[in-house]
Image (cartoon, rainbow, N blue to C red):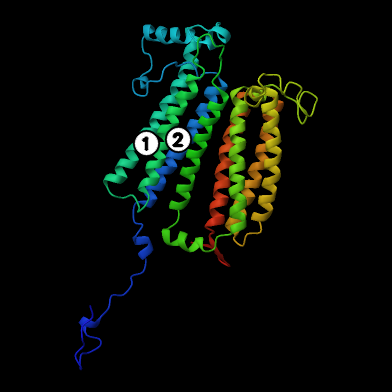
Amino acid sequence: MSRKRKLFEEVGSAEAIRPVAQPGAIDQGHTGARGAIRLWLMILFALVFLMIAVGGLTRLTDSGLSITEWRPFTGAMPPTTTAEWESEFAKYRAIDEFVIQNQWMDLDDFKVIYWWEWGHRQLGRVIGLVWALGFSWFAVRRQIPTGWTPKLVLLGALGGAQGAIGWWMVASGVTQGEGMTDVASYRLATHLGLAFVILGVITWYVLHLGRSARDLMQARRAKEAKPWGLSTGLMHFAFLQILIGALVAGIDAGRSYTDWPLMGGQVFPASAFALDPIWRNFFESPGLVQFIHRVTGYLLAAFAVVVWLRGRKSAHGTTRFAFNAVMAAVALQIVIGISTVVYGAPVHIALVHQLMAVILWVLILRARFLSGYPVATSLRGPTT
């Protein structure tokens, strides 16, 4: 409550001085170890990227069903004695993949595929441990910026869900007497799709933490709505194509038709609807699934050109460069995709195709981010 002034009280007296607003209040409200957390997230990104690469090799070498049980903790220790190796091999010999497809294997052959799957699972444990240790460190030291705790918890929850979905996927192929020699393709698509979601979340966090809260608030006022909307559409379109690509990988559809642009000498493959009931063809028919993947790729490329033409009109040089990078990645991915088909999806080309999808995914997210939070430019160059 204000008080009455004395008639001759000096206006500049100590009692009359009012508090002055301090600069940097926005950033003060978001203090925390932004740089250190960003570095931690970048390490997690590298590990998830490696996880996708190892997962791709595990699939391409048909190693995913070599471990028939889900033991999140005790499974970290591999077999060390001959008896333990024989026990693991006996479990594998009981499932359909061995009975139908791999009866030629001996113990040494089994060890090769076992180590691939064990390495894949072990890397998942390492990722979980890196997240838990990093989050605990920053939380105990109270270095997490304001509002970021739920975001980092979400990242850990997604990682935990990925482990459960990974076993849900493997369990679909660990069967006896059902004739299954691979995991269900739609479960593989779910597993890979969540991996890309996790990578996307990490990328978005890293981009935000790379700039101050004050800079982001100011940049948001210059948001370019059209490129933002188009890049958002491209992001969803690319994610759909990634899921379809996982369906292709799940049934080895990339090796079924090795001519291009035709399929078996025809525009539409003759065996597209060979399965019954008809809905199964959209998940299990190599001809139809590969055809859908090809057509979706053509449409995605056409839409990417539209997005690129709009993005290159941005008033900000950094944003224009980001959209140029997206278009270059799309063109390169098309070439790699065609090569994968023509050469019958050999391991090295198929793996490059999968990892290039990760790079394209990140570049799309970056272009979208710069559309929403453009870097101010001047005659002297970008300013932040």
Residue at left offset 37%, top offset 66%: 24
Residue 344 appears anywhere in the view: no
Instruction: Return the mark for residue 198.
Output: none
Residue at left offset 37%, top offset 61%: 27
Residue 342 percent location from the top left of the image: 72, 27
Which three-letter amino acid code belongs to the residue tagged 2? Leu
Residue 241 percent location from the top left of the image: 62, 36
Residue located beneath label 1 in the image: 130
Return the residue nearer the eye: 105 or 166. 166
Instruction: Return the mark for residue 47.
Output: 2
Cβ atoms at labels 1 and 2 below 8 Å apart: yes
Q: Is residue 112 left or right of residue 135?
A: right
Could you tell me which secondary element the residue under label 1 belongs to? helix
Task: Say whether disc 1 or disc 2 marks the residue closer to the N-terminus.
Answer: 2
Which three-letter amino acid code belongs to the residue tagged 1? Val
Residue 74 percent location from the top left of the image: 34, 20
What distance separates the C-alpha of mark 1 from that of mark 2?
9 Å
Residue at left offset 56%, top offset 27%: 186
Could you tell me which secondary element the residue under label 2 belongs to? helix
Q: Height in image: 78 above or below 82?
A: below
Return the residue nearer the eye: 6 or 303. 6
Q: Is residue 72 left or right of residue 331?
A: left
Mark 2, Cα crowd under 10 Å, few <14 / some 14-19 / many 20+, is some
Instruction: Specify the quadrant that holds the N terminus.
Output: bottom left
Residue 96 percent location from the top left of the image: 53, 10
